[in-house]
Amino acid sequence: MRALGDTLILASHNAGKLREIEALVAPHGIKARPISDFSDVEPEETGTTFAENARIKAHAAAKLTGLPALSDDSGLAVEALGGAPGVYTADWAETGNGRDFAMAMTKTHELLEAQNAPHPRKAQFCCTLCIAWPDGQDALFEGRVDGHLTWPMRGENGFGYDPVFIPEGETETFGEMEPARKAPMSHRAAAFALLKAALFDG
């Protein structure tokens, strides 16, 4: 795997993701900087897979800054819905006044009820990380966590669809878990572990 240099651009405006990346790369002498330090323009995510959208964001940031860039694309895939909402996970929550994930979770539940989907209603949280270099090369790292959906929503922790997702082998939803307990078993943690092994542990 190629070296990163001393600066890595995070192709996201999400402060939480920046903190996660900073903690990952700081021990290796690398500084993480958000793409917002350079531009507020976000590329249009026209891909139909997590990998395609992650690549779009990472390559746009690398081209703009001339530095290696890291992006992630993630979401919920419900087996009985053919993998939906998938790459449209955030879109299902969009309203005229921002994102409403309670609405999105309700929509998901109603679709499952309408087709009388059998229990357990299996689902996966998926995350694809992409590191892109300014010369056009890239590397992908994919993580996932399997589980099933429950209803009604449970828990005030987490974000997105966490209150309806119970990871395999657990009884609590991600929304009920303390962040420190959820973090090591998350889809993003699984993808980060692969990235770390490839870039820093070799």
Image (cartoon, rainbow, N blue to C red):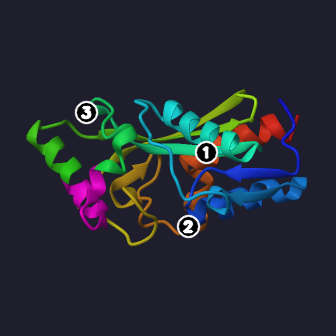
**Residue found at the very far bottom of the displayed protein:** 156
Q: Nearer the viewer, mark 2 or mark 1?
A: 1
For disc 3, the marked residue is 80
For disc 2, the marked residue is 179
At label 3, counting other C-alpha atoms closer than 10 Å, the crowd grade (few under 14, some 14-19, many 20 or more) is some
* Circle nearer the N terminus (3, 2): 3
Range drawn in magenta: 92-106
**Residue found at the very far left of the displayed protein:** 114
Q: Name the quadrant of the N terminus.
A: top right
Q: Quadrant of residue 94?
A: bottom left
Q: Position of residue 86 (x, y in %)?
A: 37, 38
Q: Position of residue 44 (x, y in %)?
A: 44, 42
Residue 71 is marked as 1
Amino acid, disc 2: Pro
Seen at 11% across and 38% down, the residue is: 116
Amino acid, disc 3: Ala
Seen at 64% across and 55% down, the residue is: 35
Amino acid, disc 1: Ser
At label 2, counting other C-alpha atoms closer than 10 Å, the crowd grade (few under 14, some 14-19, many 20 or more) is few
- Between the residue at mark 3 and the residue at mark 2, the CA separation in whole angstroms equals 28 Å
Q: Quadrant of residue 114?
A: top left
Residue 97 vs residue 110: left or right? right
Q: Name the quadrant of the C terminus.
A: top right
Seen at 39% across and 59% down, the residue is: 160
At label 1, counting other C-alpha atoms closer than 10 Å, the crowd grade (few under 14, some 14-19, many 20 or more) is many
Q: Is residue 153 visible?
A: no
